[in-house]
Amino acid sequence: MAEIKITDIKGIGPATAEGLANLGIDSVKSLAAAPVELISTLPGFFASRAHQVRQAAAELLGPTRKSPPVRKATTKKPASRTRKTTAAKKKAEKKSAAKEKLKKKMAKAKAAEKKAAAKAKLKKAEKKAATKLKAAKKKATAKKTAKKDKLKKARSKEKAARKKAAAKKQAAKKKKK
């Protein structure tokens, strides 16, 4: 006879089978023998669903094997604990998701801050380069102006010297006459 898989039971899929395996329930036999309180700790499993799944496991094993008596949930405390546990898990998941979302926002803000800092640094460097360029142009213009002034002075001195020489020549001509 082929072994019956736990996923052959109605209402148990791969995800639920994995959750049951985490609880130590990895076969139909162990599911049929497991207490309802243990099964109902799975998310989405209230006492009534846990009881139905356990009953289905016992039926799959057949009448030849004696399964432990099935206890019906007489109090709603396990179910409410499960609801509380599920609510707590959901709250924890929401909190975790919110933290993750906050981390992403913080990372984006940090990236934007870095980008802004880099942009400001670039702008500062451009401004510094522009200032240096202005200073270099001013210096070049000053040199050019100084050279022109020097040349002007030299020309005016030369002109004055020529005038003086011409005046001397004329004076010498007048004396000769």
Image (cartoon, grey):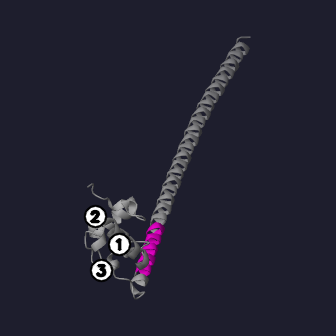
Give the x, y percent position of residue 47.
Answer: 41, 79
Mark 1: secondary structure: helix
Q: Secondary structure at mark 3?
A: loop
- Indicate the amino acid at tag 1: Arg
Q: Is residue 9 above or below residue 85?
A: above
The kind of residue on which mark 3 rests is: Pro
Task: Tell me the quarter of the image containing the N terminus.
Answer: bottom left
Residues shaded magenta: 82-98
Front residue of this view, candidates 99 and 29: 29
Q: Residue at x 26, y 68 (%)?
A: 64
Locate residue 158, reporting x and y percent: 63, 23
- How far from the left and from the top, in percent, is residue 160? 66, 25
Quarter occupied by residue 45? bottom left
Q: Which residue is mark 2?
A: 27
Residues at marks 1 and 3, CA–CA distance in whole angstroms: 11 Å
Q: Residue visible at 30% across and 66% down? A: 61
Quick one: label 1 or label 3, which is nearer the N terminus?
A: 1
Instruction: Answer left or right for 2 relative to 118.
Output: left
Q: Earlier in the sequence, mark 1 or mark 2?
A: 2
Q: Amino acid at mark 2?
A: Ser
- Residue 54 disc label: 1
Does residue 23 appear anywhere in the picture?
no
Front residue of 83/38: it is 38
Label ID, residue 69: 3
Q: Nearer the viewer, residue 18 or 105?
A: 18
Q: Residue 23, percent across and down?
A: 29, 70
| Dot 2 alpha-carbon crowd within 10 angstroms: few under 14, some 14 to 19, many 20 or more | some
